[in-house]
């Protein structure tokens, strides 16, 4: 998937049945889970989060965030809830 979000945008708190990974092309994103926060920045390493825990994503940079995103999940289960 491609993700394009404006600075300050927040997702709803959600869960994925499988792992989520993204590579930030532009901007910055913070993903918060009960285990702590992970930040994805343009030019930085990809962010990889295991499936299961609740998470909330926030576009934290001053620029529009653009990222390539992959969520792996069992086809018998919803991608997120």
Image (cartoon, helix red, strand yellow):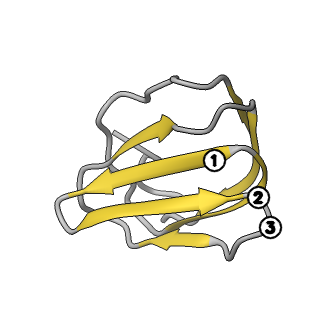
Mark 1–mark 2 Cα distance, whole angstroms, equals 7 Å
Closest to the observer: 61 or 9?
61
- Residue ID for mark 3: 43
24 and 3: which one is in front? 24
Residue at (44, 41) in percent of width and height: 57
Discs 3, 2 touching: Cβ within 8 Å: yes
Q: Quadrant of the C terminus?
A: top left
User: Dot 2, how many residues are within 10 Å of its Cα: few (below 14), some (14-19), or many (20+)?
Assistant: some
Asked which secondary structure carries label 1, the reply is: strand
The CA distance from mark 3 to mark 1 is 10 Å
| Residue at mark 3 to residue at mark 2: CA–CA distance | 4 Å
Total marks shown come to 3
Q: Residue at x 75, y 30 (%)?
A: 64
Q: Residues within 10 Å of mark 1 (few under 14, many from 20)?
A: many
Outermost residue, bottom side: 45
Residue 34 position within the rendered picture, expressed as x and y whole percent measured from the top left: 17, 60
In the picture, the disc for residue 53 is none
Contact? badges 1 and 2 (CB < 8 Å): yes
| Image quarter of residue 62 | top right
Where is mark 1, residue-wise? 28
Residue drawn at the location 66% of the way across and 23% of the way down = 6
């Amino acid at each position: 998937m491609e993700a394009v979000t404006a600075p300050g945008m927040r997702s709803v708190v959600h869960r994925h049945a499988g792992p989520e990974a993204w590579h930030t092309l532009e901007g910055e994103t913070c993903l918060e889970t009960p285990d702590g926060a992970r930040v994805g920045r343009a030019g930085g390493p990809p962010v990889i989060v295991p499936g299961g825990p609740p998470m909330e994503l926030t576009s934290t940079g001053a620029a529009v965030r653009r990222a390539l995103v992959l969520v792996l999940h069992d086809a018998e289960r919803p991608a997120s809830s």
